[in-house]
Amino acid sequence: MTDRAACERKIVLETANSEGSGRLSGEPVRLQYAALPYRLSDAGCLDIILVTSRDTGRWVLPKGWPMRGKTGAEAAAREAYEEAGIIGYPAATPVGAYHYRKRRSHGASVLCRVEVFPLDVLDELDRWPEKRQRRRSWFAAKDASGLVDEAELKALILTAQDVILRAFDKEVAAPAG
Protein backbone atom coordinates (compact mmCIF):
# COMPACT_ATOMS: atom_id res chain seq x y z
CA MET A 1 0.00 0.00 0.00
CA THR A 2 1.33 3.45 -0.86
CA ASP A 3 1.80 6.24 1.71
CA ARG A 4 -1.06 8.13 0.09
CA ALA A 5 -3.38 5.14 0.27
CA ALA A 6 -2.45 4.53 3.92
CA CYS A 7 -3.15 8.15 4.78
CA GLU A 8 -6.45 8.06 2.93
CA ARG A 9 -7.49 5.02 4.99
CA LYS A 10 -6.88 7.12 8.11
CA ILE A 11 -9.54 9.60 7.04
CA VAL A 12 -12.75 8.79 8.84
CA LEU A 13 -16.08 9.67 7.29
CA GLU A 14 -18.46 10.64 10.07
CA THR A 15 -22.05 11.13 9.06
CA ALA A 16 -23.67 12.15 12.34
CA ASN A 17 -23.77 15.77 13.37
CA SER A 18 -22.30 15.94 16.89
CA GLU A 19 -22.88 18.72 19.42
CA GLY A 20 -19.89 20.90 20.14
CA SER A 21 -17.57 19.52 17.48
CA GLY A 22 -18.83 21.63 14.59
CA ARG A 23 -19.11 18.56 12.36
CA LEU A 24 -21.28 18.70 9.30
CA SER A 25 -23.12 15.63 8.12
CA GLY A 26 -20.81 13.58 5.89
CA GLU A 27 -17.79 15.82 6.48
CA PRO A 28 -14.47 13.91 6.32
CA VAL A 29 -12.52 13.87 9.55
CA ARG A 30 -8.73 13.57 9.51
CA LEU A 31 -7.03 11.45 12.17
CA GLN A 32 -4.18 12.73 14.35
CA TYR A 33 -2.35 11.30 17.35
CA ALA A 34 -1.46 13.22 20.52
CA ALA A 35 0.61 12.49 23.59
CA LEU A 36 -0.66 13.29 27.06
CA PRO A 37 2.73 13.61 28.77
CA TYR A 38 2.41 13.08 32.52
CA ARG A 39 4.27 12.56 35.79
CA LEU A 40 3.17 11.93 39.35
CA SER A 41 3.86 14.96 41.55
CA ASP A 42 5.36 14.70 45.03
CA ALA A 43 1.85 15.29 46.40
CA GLY A 44 0.51 12.28 44.47
CA CYS A 45 -1.31 14.37 41.88
CA LEU A 46 -0.96 14.17 38.11
CA ASP A 47 1.06 16.82 36.27
CA ILE A 48 0.71 17.30 32.49
CA ILE A 49 3.06 18.95 29.98
CA LEU A 50 1.43 21.29 27.51
CA VAL A 51 3.16 23.04 24.61
CA THR A 52 2.25 26.21 22.78
CA SER A 53 0.98 26.03 19.23
CA ARG A 54 3.29 27.58 16.64
CA ASP A 55 0.71 29.91 15.12
CA THR A 56 -1.37 31.31 18.01
CA GLY A 57 0.60 30.38 21.12
CA ARG A 58 -2.39 28.51 22.60
CA TRP A 59 -1.66 25.68 25.04
CA VAL A 60 -2.10 22.28 23.34
CA LEU A 61 -0.97 18.68 23.56
CA PRO A 62 1.89 17.58 21.29
CA LYS A 63 0.16 16.03 18.27
CA GLY A 64 0.55 15.23 14.61
CA TRP A 65 -0.44 13.15 11.62
CA PRO A 66 -0.08 9.35 11.30
CA MET A 67 3.43 8.19 10.42
CA ARG A 68 4.27 5.35 8.07
CA GLY A 69 5.47 2.31 9.96
CA LYS A 70 4.48 3.67 13.38
CA THR A 71 1.53 2.86 15.61
CA GLY A 72 -0.60 5.68 16.98
CA ALA A 73 1.25 5.43 20.31
CA GLU A 74 4.64 5.59 18.58
CA ALA A 75 3.59 8.59 16.48
CA ALA A 76 2.33 10.39 19.61
CA ALA A 77 5.64 9.72 21.39
CA ARG A 78 7.55 11.05 18.37
CA GLU A 79 5.46 14.25 18.36
CA ALA A 80 6.17 14.68 22.09
CA TYR A 81 9.89 14.52 21.33
CA GLU A 82 9.71 16.92 18.36
CA GLU A 83 7.36 19.50 19.91
CA ALA A 84 8.17 19.30 23.64
CA GLY A 85 11.59 17.67 23.88
CA ILE A 86 10.38 14.87 26.09
CA ILE A 87 11.10 11.17 26.03
CA GLY A 88 8.61 8.78 27.51
CA TYR A 89 6.81 5.49 27.48
CA PRO A 90 3.45 5.68 25.63
CA ALA A 91 0.42 3.60 26.57
CA ALA A 92 -0.51 1.15 23.80
CA THR A 93 -4.13 2.30 23.70
CA PRO A 94 -5.57 5.82 23.68
CA VAL A 95 -7.27 7.17 26.78
CA GLY A 96 -9.80 8.96 24.58
CA ALA A 97 -10.17 11.34 21.66
CA TYR A 98 -11.27 14.89 20.93
CA HIS A 99 -12.08 16.98 17.87
CA TYR A 100 -10.79 20.35 16.70
CA ARG A 101 -10.62 22.38 13.52
CA LYS A 102 -7.16 22.73 12.03
CA ARG A 103 -6.72 25.94 10.10
CA ARG A 104 -4.93 25.48 6.79
CA SER A 105 -2.57 28.04 5.23
CA HIS A 106 -5.07 28.81 2.45
CA GLY A 107 -7.75 29.83 4.98
CA ALA A 108 -9.91 26.71 4.94
CA SER A 109 -10.11 24.34 7.87
CA VAL A 110 -10.28 20.60 8.29
CA LEU A 111 -11.94 18.73 11.13
CA CYS A 112 -9.54 16.46 13.02
CA ARG A 113 -10.18 13.64 15.45
CA VAL A 114 -7.22 13.34 17.82
CA GLU A 115 -6.59 10.05 19.61
CA VAL A 116 -4.75 10.75 22.87
CA PHE A 117 -2.12 8.37 24.27
CA PRO A 118 -0.86 8.79 27.85
CA LEU A 119 2.94 9.19 27.85
CA ASP A 120 4.84 8.45 31.05
CA VAL A 121 7.65 11.04 30.87
CA LEU A 122 11.10 9.61 31.51
CA ASP A 123 13.31 12.53 30.45
CA GLU A 124 13.14 16.20 29.45
CA LEU A 125 15.72 17.31 26.90
CA ASP A 126 17.46 20.69 26.86
CA ARG A 127 17.46 20.73 23.04
CA TRP A 128 14.81 19.42 20.66
CA PRO A 129 13.66 20.05 17.06
CA GLU A 130 10.94 22.67 17.75
CA LYS A 131 12.45 24.36 20.82
CA ARG A 132 12.68 27.76 19.09
CA GLN A 133 9.05 27.55 17.92
CA ARG A 134 7.25 26.46 21.10
CA ARG A 135 7.23 26.69 24.89
CA ARG A 136 6.58 23.74 27.18
CA SER A 137 5.42 23.77 30.76
CA TRP A 138 4.18 21.41 33.46
CA PHE A 139 0.71 22.01 34.92
CA ALA A 140 -1.46 20.21 37.45
CA ALA A 141 -4.04 18.26 35.42
CA LYS A 142 -6.89 20.50 36.62
CA ASP A 143 -4.95 23.62 35.55
CA ALA A 144 -3.99 22.05 32.20
CA SER A 145 -7.65 21.29 31.60
CA GLY A 146 -8.49 24.95 32.14
CA LEU A 147 -5.79 26.16 29.73
CA VAL A 148 -6.79 24.21 26.61
CA ASP A 149 -9.54 25.56 24.33
CA GLU A 150 -11.37 22.43 23.20
CA ALA A 151 -14.21 21.34 25.51
CA GLU A 152 -13.71 17.66 24.64
CA LEU A 153 -10.00 17.94 25.50
CA LYS A 154 -10.76 19.66 28.83
CA ALA A 155 -12.95 16.71 29.84
CA LEU A 156 -10.50 14.15 28.45
CA ILE A 157 -7.62 15.52 30.58
CA LEU A 158 -9.69 15.20 33.76
CA THR A 159 -10.86 11.70 32.82
CA ALA A 160 -7.30 10.66 31.95
CA GLN A 161 -6.13 11.94 35.32
CA ASP A 162 -8.56 9.59 37.08
CA VAL A 163 -7.62 6.63 34.85
CA ILE A 164 -3.87 7.13 35.27
CA LEU A 165 -4.05 7.69 39.04
CA ARG A 166 -6.21 4.54 39.45
CA ALA A 167 -3.58 2.60 37.49
CA PHE A 168 -0.87 3.93 39.84
CA ASP A 169 -2.96 2.93 42.86
CA LYS A 170 -3.37 -0.62 41.49
CA GLU A 171 0.35 -0.84 40.75
CA VAL A 172 1.28 0.28 44.28
CA ALA A 173 -1.29 -2.04 45.90
CA ALA A 174 -0.26 -5.10 43.88
CA PRO A 175 1.78 -7.62 45.89
CA ALA A 176 5.38 -8.09 44.80
CA GLY A 177 5.69 -11.32 42.88
Image: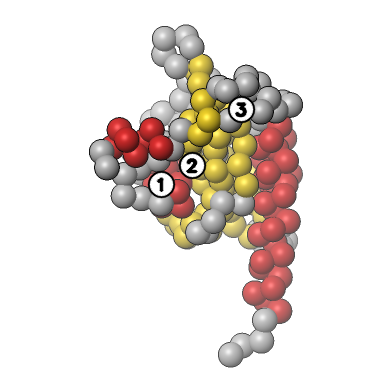
Please say if 123 is above or below 141. below
Q: Residues within 10 Å of mark 3 (few under 14, many from 20)?
A: few
Please name the residue shown 66% across and 66% down the image: 167
Q: Residue 33 got which mark?
A: 2
- The residue pinned by badge 3 equals 15
Please name the residue shown 66% across and 37% down the image: 153
- The residue pinned by badge 1 equals 75
- Cα–Cα span, label 2 and label 3: 21 Å
Residue lying at the far top in this picture: please name it: 107
Mark 2: which secondary structure? strand
Q: Residue 135 got which mark?
A: none
Please say if 40 is above or below 149. below
Residue 85 seen from this side: no
Task: Name the residue nearer the viewer: 84 or 91.
Answer: 91
Question: Residue 170: x, y in percent?
Answer: 69, 73
Q: Quadrant of the N terminus?
A: top left
Question: Residue 163: x, y in percent?
Answer: 69, 58
- Cα–Cα span, label 3 and label 1: 27 Å
